[in-house]
Image (cartoon, rainbow, N blue to C red):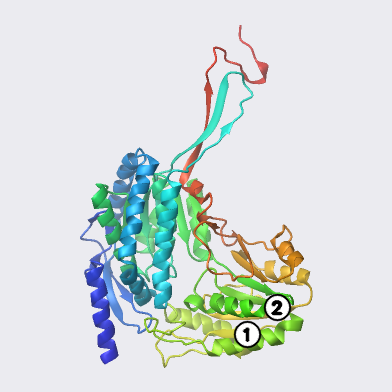
Amino acid sequence: MLVEQSRERRLQTLLERLEIRIPHAGACAGPRWLEHGGESLPSLDPTTGNMIGEVIAADHAAFEWIVEQAQTAFLRWRMKPAPRRGWLIRDLGTALRELQEPLGELISFEVGKILAEGVGEVQEMIDVCDFAVGLSRQLYGLTMASERPGHRMYEQWHPLGPIAVITAFNFPAAVWSWNAAVAAVCGDTMIWKPSRQALLTAVAIQNIVNRVCRDHGEEGVFNLIIGSRDVVGEALLRDRRIPLVSFTGSVRVGRHTSEVVARRLGRSLLELGGNNAVIVTEHANLDLAVRAVLFGAVGTAGQRCTTTRRLIVQRSIAPTLLSRLVEAYRQVRVGDPLEEGTLMGPLINPHAVTTMMEAVRSAVEQGGEILVGGKARPDLGPNFVEPTIIKMPVQTPLVCEETFAPILYVLEYETLEEAVSLHNGVPQGLSSSIFTTHLQEAERFLSAEGSDCGIANVNLGTSGAEIGGAFGGEKETGGGRESGSDAWRAYMRRQTVTINWSDDLPLAQGIRFE
């Protein structure tokens, strides 16, 4: 009882610090909240199963209001010089620094991440703001040689419009910022639909953004709409006023998103599933490999799109590596994510637990051997499980699926060609890794005949992508790219420009008119 009271007091302090009222409105054309709407949606603490807050879902009228405000704001925001747009994002980064700890703690409360991961996720938001500020002065086009005398040809990039950002529960803050910070300096406005499992986090972020926008005299640049799939989700996909939909989530919903948006010839940016593998060769540094595999497989309770789900290990070193991994797994402390020393918190909800237990049973039926874990932990709370390693005889259909849980499937190989074939033999193509000190092995893995993923690492794990690199993957991962490098181009429209500064007008194919 005392523990529950302590958590309750801790939560109330967070809500007050982050300016969250319960129940809270779920529609905002920043910085104005719409104080009416539809049904009340609960936010549940996955650690205890208790309700920690409520948000009022948006209705159709609220949806129309939000889209209209985003449109109106876009007409104004697009004409502001990009470096000036960067000033707002700079100040957003400062505001996030001031509230990093409470916002990170709220993330831990609401989605079950350990506190270090919650605070670390806010650091990702800060980092991408820093990146976007620099980007605001680097939205470069190209000058190209014209074949016509007295002509100049170049390309330039213009803002695209109001864009929809639909995010998942596992990174309820960072993924929004990857899109929003970059798109904002590109001149776009945002309509954000967050996960139903992370409602309070979205409200908290919107409150922070609202404060920054008020300081800059801006309205409607960052907008939030919380609601059902039918009222909000499908409307965002079908609305011709929204030229781009950025979706992060499952392959199933991503496929539907792509199809609906394509029917109106809109754009979609998809970040979908991952079935990421680590190859460990006989030339690997096993100390590095053990640490990377453990973190990659257990971090966020296996609920990252970059989670390590398959370990492909050379047969001669498999006994040694697996022995060390099993010992490391047994030392993982599972429990309250807010407690110091906890390394793995709960899964997001009971359905996730059921899905994991079904996968474990199926793996055993398909010849798998449980090396460690494999059980639910209801003694710790409704959504806790043991991190699990299962050695598989072959890469079965189950192993080719993504189970959003801390299950690591182990496969053995003889030759590197066999390892790469196993690695690439799944529908997903997000993140990949090889551990080797052998130059030829590393280079082959990075070559055109190597990893088929959007991210390929050598001597580090599948998780932990940096802000400066473009994040995303191939095949059923969706092909989208967010955050670094030239990912900004997804949020803009390209325009090729030709200027005739001569007194002549040469026509194509040498056609002449006298």
Q: Is 49 situated above or below 420?
A: below
Residue type for callout 2? Val
- The crowding category of the residue bearing disc 2, from other C-alpha atoms within 10 Å (few below 14, some 14 to 19, many at least 20), is many
Q: CA distance from mark 1 to mark 2?
A: 13 Å
**Residue drawn at x 55%, y 36% as measured from the top left:** 142
Location of mark 2 (residue): 313
Quarter location, residue 93 = bottom left
Q: Is 364 situated above or below 72?
A: below
Q: Is residue 238 visible?
A: no
Q: Residue furthest top?
A: 514
Q: Nearer the viewer, residue 266 or 504?
A: 504
User: Residue 503 at what x, y percent from top left?
Assistant: 54, 12
In which quadrant is the N terminus drawn?
bottom left
**Residue drawn at x 68%, y 66% as measured from the top left:** 424
Q: Is 163 situated above or below 464?
A: above
Q: Is residue 291 visible?
A: yes
Q: Left or right of 386: which side holds 19? A: left
- The crowding category of the residue bearing disc 1, from other C-alpha atoms within 10 Å (few below 14, some 14 to 19, many at least 20), is many
**Residue drawn at x 28%, y 83% as measured from the top left:** 7
**Residue drawn at x 27%, y 77% as measured from the top left:** 11
Residue type for callout 1? Ile
Label whose residue precedes the other's in the sequence (1 or 2): 2
Location of mark 1 (residue): 390
Q: Is 85 situated above or below 283?
A: above
User: Residue 374 at what x, y percent from top left?
Assistant: 55, 88
User: Residue 245 at what x, y percent from top left?
Assistant: 45, 53
Check contact, mark 1 vs mark 2: CB within 8 A: no
In which quadrant is the C terminus drawn?
top right
Q: Left or right of 202: which side holds 471? A: right
User: Residue 51 at what x, y percent from top left?
Assistant: 30, 79
